Amino acid sequence: MTRRPLSTYRLQIRPGFTLDDAASVTRYLADLGASWAYLSPLLAATPGSDHGYDVVDPSRVDDSRGGPEGLRRFAEAARAAGLGILADIVPNHVGVAVPRDSLWWWDLLRLGPGSRYATAFDVDDRVADGRVRLPILGAPLAEVIGDGQLKIDHAPAADAPDGTLSYFDHVLPLSPGSAAHADDIAELLEAQHYELRFWEDQNTDLNYRRFFAVSELAGIRVEDPDVFEESHREILRWITEGLADGLRVDHPDGLRDPGAYLEQLAEATGGAYTLVEKILEPGEELPGWWRTDGTTGYDALVEIDRVLIDGAGVRSLDALDRELRSGSGLPAPESWHDLIHGTKRMIADELLQSEVRRLVRTLPTEIDGAADAVSEIVASFPVYRSYLPAGREHLAHAIEDAVRRRPDLQDAIAALAPLLADASLEVAQRFPQLSGAVMAKGVEDTAFYRLTRLGTLTEVGGDPSIDSISVYDFHEAQRARAASWPHSLTALSTHDTKRSEDVRARLSVLAEVPERWGEVLTDLRAVASTGHGPLDALLWQAAVGAWPISTERLHAYGLKAAREAAESTRWQHPDVEFEKGVAAIAEAANGAAREIVEGFVDEIVLPGRSNSLSAKLLQLAAPGVPDVYQGTELWDHSLVDPDNRRPVDFVARSEMLAQLDDDVAGGILPPIDDSGLAKMLVTSRALRARRDHPELYDGYRPGTVVGEAAEHAVAMDRGGVIAVATRLPVGLARRGGWGDTALLRRETPAVDVLTGRRFEAGSVRLDDLLATYPVALLVEQR
């Protein structure tokens, strides 16, 4: 029988926080109420990697993360604390930034087709005579040769019997017998199984599949049984030896056939608990035939955020955005779908043109204008990908939209349509891998940094054109999860979120005070500005949402945001002059504008904390398996990675939890203040209730709230537990509070586990129930 968690707690394992460090916090996680520990990737990764998604050797646990013995010690500690273990795995790609550290890649580069790993990598042998194109040069090859920048070392080594070729920090193996060309560097290079290319050629001429546009992450053919077996042998050992209970599969959409992969994984693990990192667009459902327990929870994150947002206020922020654009000499804003069509088309034409060209090379017949047509279809694709034969309706939509936008390509699109729908063809098998990459880069990593009116809306898994949802729609989404995917993860913060849950919760208040935010933004821009109004709004929101924030953190975020937006500056070709404006904002936040920032934060911090506590309780009580991202049991105001991978002080948290328990036992409840103890109270009590009384969470019904302020409450009845949360706290305060609003309950006594207060049978007024905190968790006394 598959063992499944009641909740998880995500730990980022890295050289600075090893498996032994993780072992030392297992007791704290259990005391907090977590059911399983959820570990980031553990396999050997590129030296210095903090995230671990750049695996270089799938046969062993990374020594810098604690090694195999560290994993065993962690597992022993977790078991002693009563915790299960969920491990994050990466089947789509391996890290190749440092070839010598990447066992499979080094062998391929040295031996080419004779390598045992030749079939492991997704390399197109139609070009460059099958040689792997390496975009590592700072100039075209002829210039590099002419400048003498390539160095040959003929000294044999265990992994390079014929010597090595070096270009600055890049070291590559020489192929067998190629040393005979030592006197002619051009002939020597021709004798290798790789082809050195100018770094910009990665956009157009790369011939191996990547993770999105990251050339340092090379895709592997996990659909090959031998590749699956060798890349998963160590992972399967964790399951069979009891070192892990379940797996989180990173980026399955990068695989040729995710469903078949999950089937193979389930057979190999005996049906172990398995989650997929999958973004679902509005209305899209997780494929029901997949052998998985659900997603990693972006869908739940969006539902919780949206039910706490004032949609009318967002429309006022839209007006502010139009003013900012007009004042900056920018065109009027496009619709969301037109905006992302443009950003996706840009990605297909630029960063991922290599992938488009490869797709065209797979066509069984030549089609005039094929590359242009493929790019237009992929830009119109409405979801991340299809899983043929399922999903043909998405392809049909994309075809129709592409023809509407580009009637000049009608013939090419018509010729492509049946080929892209034929699952037996390579072009149809590869197109979904391309569409997912274009969506990720064009939407999450570009458009999200251009549509800036409210940062809460541009979060992973979200569609910013949907600015809010009703309480009714929220309940419908929870009922659907309870019915179809009861063991799917739910999340509020992850290592991939653009902003932490508490940043988003604070920013959501802007939709309740749009005019006031407009005034404050005007004052802030008068102190420092990039000259690009929407980007200014994004950066000043980051300052306000993550406050207090250092100049260094805000500057790093600002540069990433501006370059991802790719409007005034870019990663590959930064505009140094424009970026001075980004630096000016970062410096002003803690300098000339500090008083303005702090004054406004003081105005919104309390309703922001109300949103935070409401979101946390809704997540922890709702259907699914709630995940707590490391450190977020206290206030956490992190921005996009790597900001959200900063060290977490678990010693302090453990001490705080112990003191909190003592205080609560003595009748002392924590205030909602800077300490974050109120959030720790909500987190720990909700997790413990779920762990200790899982039988009380056996259903889902909307709670019934009546009265003059009923629209400001969200209540859910899980069977024996009722969670109540506050929404739109500024509006609630404006109307004078809860008034006669009441929660209708069964004739059963209940205890609010957050405050310890007992409520007798029947309805309860919300001004009484929520007198201490904006949330309550009523556990029925049966």
Image: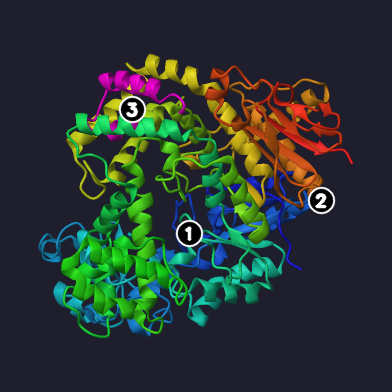
Amino acid type of the residue tagged 1 in the rendering:
Ala
Provide residue 74's location: percent of width, then percent of height. 68, 53
Left or right, 270 with respect to 458, comes to right
Which badge, 3 or 2, comes first in the chain's sequence? 3
Q: How many labels does the image show?
A: 3
Query: Left of 367 or right of it: where is 484?
Result: right
Estimate how packed mark 2 is, as few (under 14), some (14 to 19) or many (20 or more) residues with alpha carbons within 10 Å: few
Q: Position of residue 617 (x, y in %)?
A: 65, 38
Image: 283 above or below 429: above
SS class, disc 1: strand
Q: Which of marks 1 and 3 is nearer the N terminus?
A: 1
Say which residue label 1 marks: 45
Q: Do the residues labelled 1 and 3 touch (CB within 8 Å)?
A: no
Amino acid under disc 3:
Ala
Cα separation between marks 1 and 3: 33 Å
* Quadrant, the N terminus: bottom right
Q: Mark 2 points at which residue?
A: 695
